[in-house]
Amino acid sequence: KWDRRLGLLLREYDFTGTRCLDLGCNRGFFAFGLSGLADSVVGIDADESFISANVAYAAAHGVKNVRFEKATVTPGVIDSLDHFDVTLMLSLLHHILAASAKYARFGTDGNVEYCVELLSRVAAHTDTLVFEMGQSNEDLPWAADLPVMTPDPSTWIIERLLKPAGFGEIRALPPTAF
């Protein structure tokens, strides 16, 4: 699954010579996957164990153009960052948007306005956002905690999150692509 997603990203965008940010980098798959093309990659995740493992992997494999930071993705954290050519925000925002207490570490009740504010800060710090999020119609436990995304999830995400945050040129890939 991850290889297929990385392959899609590499077909859709030329990462050569870019400065990339990977928000919610998890185990660093995309950060490491882009390291051979990008000039630099910064991965941010709230999970200390992921960050520690990623730092160790980078050191063990001589990956010098990737760095990892432990931080919860908030507007303040985004504002503390430099400008990036490309920002990846893959499978992160639905966790922030979900109203479940399970995601209380994000310091928000998961409302739409907070997510728009977060995305607007991302828009101010990047030229291109590569974005993907879970949807309320998925058969996964957290989906029930998301707002109902009508008339359809893709339109809802674009109209309620991306456009209000300032993203004007939006190109949607087929849902099955990811």
Image (cartoon, rainbow, N blue to C red):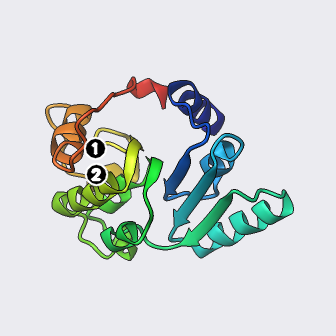
9 relative to 139, above or below: above
Residue 132 in view (yes/no) = no
- Image quadrant in which the N terminus is located: top right
Q: Marks 2 and 1, Cα distance to the nearest angstrom? A: 6 Å
Task: Identify the residue under disc 1.
Answer: 136
Q: Amino acid at mark 1?
A: Ser
Secondary structure beneath dot 2 equals helix
Tags 2 and 1 touching, CB below 8 Å: yes
Look at the numbered disc 1 and give the secondary structure of its residue. Answer: loop
User: Which percent across, then down, holds residue 107?
Assistant: 31, 76
Residue highlighted by disc 2: 144
Seen at 63% across and 44% down, the residue is 38
Q: Is residue 91 visible?
A: yes
Q: Is residue 115 above or below residue 153?
A: below
Front-most of residues 156 and 87: 87
Determine the residue positioned at 67% across, 43% down.
33
Q: Nearer the viewer, mark 2 or mark 1?
A: 1
Q: Which percent across, then down, holds residue 76?
A: 33, 74
Closer-to-camera residue (64/74): 64
Q: What percent of the width, then of the height, locates residue 9? A: 54, 32
- Which residue is depicted at the point 37% across and 58% down? 95
Quadrant hosting residue 27: bottom right
> Would you call the spot at circle 2 few (<14 residues within 10 Å), some (14-19), or many (20 or more)?
some
On residue 72, the disc is none
Report the side of 149 relative to 17 (left or right): left
**Circle nearer the N terminus (2, 1):** 1
- Residues 8 and 106: in front is 8
> Type of residue at label 2?
Ala
Label 1 Cα neighbours within 10 Å, binned few <14 / some 14-19 / many ≥20: many
Residue at (19% x, 42% y) in the render: 163
**Location of residue 28 in the rendering, given as x and y in whole percent from the top left corner:** 64, 55
